[in-house]
Image (spheres, rainbow, N blue to C red):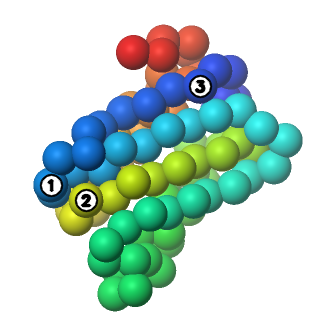
Amino acid sequence: MKLLNHAKAGTLESGDVFITVTPGEELLIRLDSPVKQQFGDAIMDLVRKVLEEQEVTSGTIELSDQGALDCTIRARLMTALERASKGDVS
């Protein structure tokens, strides 16, 4: 999947995650989370897995986590990637 545009998904509400995706030359993943020390590695592993499944090899992925479950992180990331690949920035 090629990222064509800047896109976002999610909210900053408790139990959610706000994700922004931006095209770029290399793959960068940034995570901001109050539970980063305890769950940061697991969150990053999940993000890398989704990116690998979707064949995303470049771009900047920024996550502002508010305690989201894995299923929420996956859903928000998939939505942002889909929007970025199709040009829908809503």
**Which label was assigned to residue 88?**
none
> For the residue marked with disc 1, what is the amino acid?
Ser
Distance from disc 3 to disc 2, alpha carbons, whole Å, reads 21 Å
Distance from disc 3 to disc 1, alpha carbons, whole Å, reads 24 Å
2 lies left or right of 44? right
> For the residue marked with disc 3, what is the amino acid?
His
Q: Horizontal and vertical percent for residue 49?
A: 52, 61
Mark 3, other Cα within 10 Å: few <14 / some 14–19 / many ≥20 = many
Judge whether residue 75 can be spotted in this image. no
Q: Which residue is under mark 2?
A: 66
Residue 54: name its quadrant.
top right
Residue located 36% across and 33% down the image: 9
Residue 58: name its quadrant.
top right
Q: Quadrant of the N terminus?
A: top right
User: Between disc 3 and disc 1, whose residue precedes?
Assistant: 3
Residue situated in front as seen by the camera: 37 or 76: 37
Distance from disc 1 to disc 2, alpha carbons, whole Å, reads 5 Å
Q: Horizontal and vertical percent for residue 76?
A: 34, 41
Q: Are marks 1 and 2 in contact (CB under 8 Å)?
A: yes
Element carrying mark 3? loop
Q: Horizontal and vertical percent for residue 71?
A: 24, 55
Q: Going by the picture, which residue comes out furthest to the left?
A: 14
Q: Which residue is under mark 1?
A: 14
37 lies left or right of 30? left
Residue located 33% across and 58% down the image: 65
> For the residue marked with disc 2, what is the amino acid?
Gln
Q: Which residue is under mark 3?
A: 6
User: Between disc 1 and disc 2, whose residue precedes?
Assistant: 1
Q: Quadrant of the C terminus?
A: top left
Judge whether residue 56 can be spotted in this image. yes
